[in-house]
Image: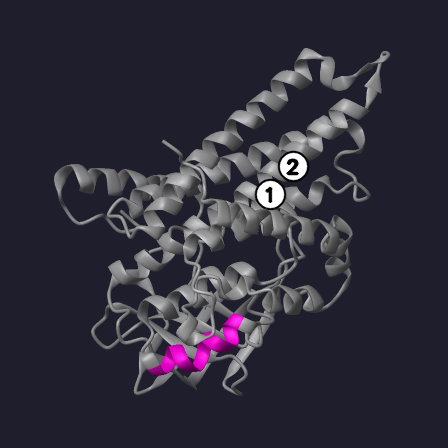
């Protein structure tokens, strides 16, 4: 039995890797650290022209209609080069929310612009530190207007619109579309561990908003987060794989006592542990990609497993990459910290690994008892 991606997606992966290695070396991410605008606008336009932003968008809305497997393949390659573009926010979150819950008019209005990169979208949901609990959202949508504050919104500093998680009149979680260029919206850029990816706190003061009518209830919101988590896990896998390869190459070229340091047992064992963590994440990611593409009832369990494994792989690989490079591994001049920063940031996006472990236990318990999965705060 073949568990790998179909040949056409392998070809897409090879094409994407060749292009991104040439167009987005670590130096490109370093440049983002020096700019007020953290996005590589030229790269963003180019990947839009190549159709990578529209892989999961149906042809009727200006997309390629390749499905989520294509997005997973592209996400891994984006992670490998730690690309300074809002791919995760716009593709995994905003696009996915519209595909799942948008009306026909909303899809026709937003998806073609997302497909070309003309518009950048994001998902605004975090309101406080701690476990994510949709039932505790304080942001309100009443009489067509949105009021509240969202913290650390990914790419909130550059996004044109946001899908905002709110509480409606019925006290149930729901989603709304908000134009972030409205005068009633204020943004404050927030520093994070990875300066190459912008974040912002966004305050809505009675801003006009449009509801996604099918996105009512905690189950709908959690389903969106599960789907985004699968694609995010592939991006994390790309970061971990690149860090492992960086450490391997350095261990083969750096000599000590007349031998490559990779010949010493301490380094060998270190890199083997990283390889095991990475391959474990890969197997879980492939399972989750199948569950996402096939709309399997296993999606909640598979998404949580892939997220947990990819967080562990990203942390292990980027940490040991620094250690393998020795005394200079932690310095600014080396590229190791760029991967470490991205891995740590991704490990907190969409909820921490601890939250996903709690969610995995809840989903497994629900499956065994045929009950409704517990929420994030259970």
**Classed neighbour count for the residue bearing mark 1: other residues with Cα under 10 Å, few (<14), some (14–19), many (≥20):** many
User: Residue 227: horizontal and vertical position, in percent?
Assistant: 37, 54
Q: Label 1: which residue?
A: 239
Q: Is residue 167 left or right of residue 277?
A: left
Magenta stretch mostly in which secondary structure? helix
Above or below residue 261? Residue 165 is: below
Residue at horizontal 72 percent and vertical 18 percent from the top = 262
Determine which quarter of the picture holds residue 266. Answer: top right
The residue identified by callout 2 is: 243
Evaluate whether residue 120 shows in this view. no
Q: Where does the magenta region start and end?
A: 105-115
User: Residue lying furthest front in this view?
Assistant: 7
Tell me how far mark 1 sits from mark 2, CA to CA.
6 Å
The picture places residue 219, in percent across and down from the top left corner, at 25, 58
Q: Name the image quarter holding the N terminus.
A: top left
Rendering coords of residue 165 (x, y %): 37, 68
Q: In the image, what residue occupies the spot 73% across and 29% down?
A: 249
- Relative vertical location of residue 227 with respect to residue 58 in this rendering, above or below: above
Residue closest to the far right: 258
Assess whether mark 2 and mark 1 are in contact (beta carbons under 8 angstroms): yes
Q: Is residue 321 left or right of residue 214?
A: right
Q: Percent from the top left, x then y, of residue 56?
A: 44, 62
Identified at 78% across, 52% down, the residue is 27
Name the secondary structure under disc 1: helix
Residue lying furthest left: 370
Q: Nearer the viewer, residue 289 or 207?
A: 289
Residue 34 falls inside the magenta stretch: no
The foreground one among 296 and 144 is 296
**Seen in the image, is 350 located left or right of residue 32?**
left
Viewer-proximal residue, 227 or 184?
227
Front residue of 134 and 83: 83
């Amino acid at each position: 039995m073949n568990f790998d991606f179909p040949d056409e997606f392998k070809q897409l992966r090879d094409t994407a890797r060749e292009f991104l290695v040439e167009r987005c070396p670590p130096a490109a991410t370093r440049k983002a650290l020096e700019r007020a605008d953290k996005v590589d606008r030229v790269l963003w336009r180019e990947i839009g022209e190549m159709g990578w932003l529209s892989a999961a968008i149906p042809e009727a809305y200006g997309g390629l209609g390749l499905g989520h497997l294509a997005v997973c393949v592209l996400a891994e390659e984006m992670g490998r080069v730690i690309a300074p573009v809002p791919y995760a926010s716009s593709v995994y979150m905003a696009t996915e929310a519209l595909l799942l819950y948008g009306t026909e008019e909303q899809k026709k209005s937003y998806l073609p612009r997302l497909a070309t990169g003309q518009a950048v979208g994001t998902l605004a949901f975090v309101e406080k530190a701690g476990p994510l609990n949709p039932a505790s959202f304080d942001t309100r949508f009443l009489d067509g207007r949105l009021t509240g504050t969202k913290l650390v919104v990914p790419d909130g500093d550059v996004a044109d619109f946001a899908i905002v998680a709110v509480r409606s009149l019925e006290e149930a979680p729901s989603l709304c579309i908000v134009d972030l260029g409205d005068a009633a919206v204020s943004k404050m850029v927030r520093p994070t561990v990875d300066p190459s990816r912008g974040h912002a706190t966004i305050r809505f003061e009675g801003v006009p908003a449009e509801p996604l009518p099918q996105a009512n209830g905690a189950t709908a919101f959690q389903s969106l987060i599960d789907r985004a988590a699968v694609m995010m896990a592939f991006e994390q896998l790309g970061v971990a794989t690149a860090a492992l390869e960086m450490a391997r190459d350095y261990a083969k070229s750096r000599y000590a006592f007349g031998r490559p340091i990779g010949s010493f047992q301490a380094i060998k064992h270190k890199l083997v542990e990283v390889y095991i963590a990475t391959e474990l994440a890969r197997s879980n990611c492939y399972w989750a990609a199948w569950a996402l593409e096939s709309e399997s009832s296993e999606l909640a369990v598979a998404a949580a497993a892939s997220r947990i494994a990819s967080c562990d792989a990203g942390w292990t690989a980027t940490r040991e990459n620094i250690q393998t490079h020795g005394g200079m591994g932690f310095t600014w001049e080396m590229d190791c910290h760029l991967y470490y920063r991205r891995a740590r940031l991704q490990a907190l996006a969409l909820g921490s690994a601890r939250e996903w472990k709690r969610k995995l236990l809840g989903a497994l318990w629900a499956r065994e008892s045929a009950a409704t999965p517990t929420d994030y705060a259970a």
